[in-house]
Image (cartoon, rainbow, N blue to C red):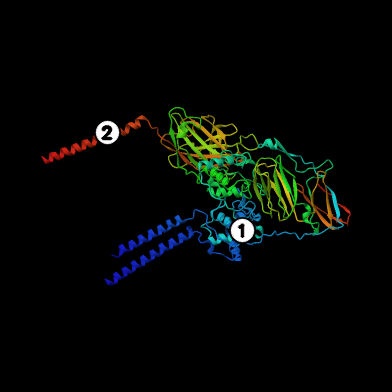
Amino acid sequence: MFKKSAFEVNRKHLFGALSILIVAAAAAVTSAAVFRPRISNPSSVVLPPAQDLEIGRAVYTEYCDICHGVEGDGNGPGAANMDPRPRDFRRGWYEIRTTASGQLPTDEDLQRIIAVGMPGTTMPAWQGKLSEQEIQAVTQYIKSFSRRFERETPTRVELGQKVASSQDSIARGREIYQGAEAECVKCHGNAGRGDGPSADELTEDAFGDVIVPADLTMPWLFRGGPTVEEIAMRLKTGLTGGPMPAYADVLSDEDIWHLANYVDSLGADAPPEYQPAIIASFVQGALPDDSGAAAWQETAEYYYPFLGQIMVGERNFTPSISGVWVRALYNDQELALQLRWHDRVQDAGEGQNPSDGFAVQFPAELSDSDDNPYFVLGDPSHAVNLWVWDASTNAIEERTARGAGTEQTQTGQDIQGSAAYTDGEYILIVHRNLRNTVAEDIQFELGRFIPIAFIAWDGWQTEQIGSGAISSWFQIYLDRPVTATTYLWIPAAIIVTALLETWAVWGARRQARKREN
Amino acid sequence: MKRPVILFLHLILISVFIVSCGGGAAQEPTSPPAAATLPPASANTEPAAAGGYEGIPVTGGGTISGKITYSGAPVEPEVVTVDKDQEVCGDSKEVLKVKTDEAGGLANAVVHITDITSGKPLESMGTEFVLDQKQCEYVPEVVVIPTGVPLTVLNSDGILHNVHTTPFDNPPLNVAQPASQAEIQSEPFNIPENVPVGCDVHKWMHSTIVVVDNPYAVVTGADGSYTLTDVPPGSYTIEVWHAELGKQTTNVTVEASQEATADVDFK
């Protein structure tokens, strides 16, 4: 007995020890792989430059040259599909700096970009993937591509006392933005959507690539970060290599803070969160065509992000339009959608560019399974019903498609819609009957989740229906209308419950009395 | 008795594991890391290129003169419709990239001795070099500037221009010059090269800043003629550069106090 029990104990110990080992090892592996210790105590690691360059070269060869090229010319094998293209390191031009226009970036500037990446570009964040030491080392290696780093020493600029954001500060910032003091409006446009009169002419110098002015209402896409401090620094130092000039000698630090506060007020730091379903609200009477109408203002707005269409035909890794805001209303007859998206240049197909456009996709037939049509314009066994708006006619039509390139205009049209373009934004309002007799049209049912997807294209960037921005499938849900009877059900239920309970209590008491007697 | 203890131990370990993972995630840095201070690659801020040119008093110098011509197909002006600032820029701009007179004399070419090691001092070129922005055009279309000297950029238009240079070896510049900035000064250009300059607000505006480290460089006049004076006797290579037509070289020998001729034709 004793022996056996000892064996049991040992076995338990063994089991316990093994479990501890497994759990500890898993924890170690997980934390090492996913949660690299954050960069700490920076001055503790100072490597001799030769060793730095050696490590840096190894890191660069492993991770960087695929885009930035072996020679650091920004022309690696992956560069062709990138917009903006990868940085050419040979000139020592860096957009995001804390140094004066014309100066090289500091090591900290370069390390920061390597660590956190550049939003709105293909440059990822390497923090977590590379150690602090590796980031420092590759920084030294990147600097070796330009001889300017041997000749020039950058110095960090100071921004002066920060001006806290206030209504007055924002108002002063707007004055600078619009007026002759800075004329930001020339490129970034009246509402900051990157649609100024010079927007369609900008090129990234010496590379010849088209570059677009930042849409200031989407700070989460700012290359150098969305915070007011980062915005102020960009205003002061400009973006070397791009068209954004420095305002250091033009505006006082105080005015730079006012302007930064204004820019900061134009958009949230993070993109809107998107919901899986658009809830369409019921409206009595006609659905308004005016986007300012109360019914539109009162219903919820939903945001859906776009991706480039990279699945079929001409692939687009960098679509021009980044998302769409949607509202939905319906009445006894019709469904109306209000679609709002930013487009820097209005193209109605009159110039050299193709016209702008937008399409809403539905499955032609609703299925009870999750068997949606292929999200890029359907597939041979699942047709999609497309509502296609074109800027050249400012009209909308229904088409049927069974795959990209198979769109056919339907013979019977049952849809109306037109868009208005103001300050870099389209607002399109579309109406269609809830139900009709066209076989390949979506039929809307109340209280059912119906798949919906969006496609947008920007003529200025020579995009077309199959080569622009596209969303995956989301849902639209026509909420059952709240009628007078809905309100009656609740008091009725309360009354019925009360009666039933009274009856039950009365019954119980009666029985109890009977037993006592 | 043992089993509950071990089970309890497991529970503790698993919760420690979960907490440590969660904790790790919470510690993920959200702000840019404080970066290390590394020694600068070099503290040397001296201009790298002095070019080895030496300024000396020149006695008995000769003159090189000539005419730069263009005999290729006539170049038509590109007409740009102006869609902003029309009150200053006008309604349209004619951009003529190759300017010639009736005889084919080519304006705005830069004639430059590239292999001279000593001669009149660099300062003989003057001390003030100006690029103006007038009616949304650069005046002059080409500026020759010696190394070590800043460029003065004027804005005679009273509207926003941005002065955007795209050099290779010199520090680039991209500064806003709105109405309030009638005059700005660049940093000195320390390395000889041709520096394109443009305005992103008005896409048709282009000029070139030609940085030289010897004073034997000049821009041709409207008739394509040029003169280089006080050239010490010797044999030289002359380079002729034009922003649109590129580069050609020719050789010339200068005798003391004599006039030598070097003509170049672009086709």
Measuring from the top left, give residue B246's x and y in whole percent: 76, 49
The single residue placed furthest to the left in the displayed view is A517
Q: CA distance from mark 1 to mark 2?
A: 78 Å
Kindly identify the amino acid type of the residue bearing the numbered disc 1.
Ile
Q: Is residue B114 positioned above or below A484 on the image?
A: below
Asked whether residue B223 appears in the rendered view, the answer is yes
Residue contact between numbered discs 1 and 2, judged by CB atoms under 8 Å:
no
**Could you say which disc has been placed on residue A495 in the image?**
2
In the picture of the structure, the residue carrying the numbered disc 1 is A142
The kind of secondary structure element at disc 2 is helix
Q: Earlier in the sequence, mark 1 or mark 2?
A: 1
Crowding near the residue tagged with mark 2, few <14, some 14–19, many ≥20 C-alpha atoms within 10 Å = few
In this orientation, which residue lies closer to the viewer: B109 or B118? B118
Q: In the drawing, does residue B252 fall left or right of residue A262?
A: right
Kindly identify the amino acid type of the residue bearing the numbered disc 2.
Ile
Q: Quadrant of residue A458?
A: top right
Q: Quadrant of residue A409?
A: top right
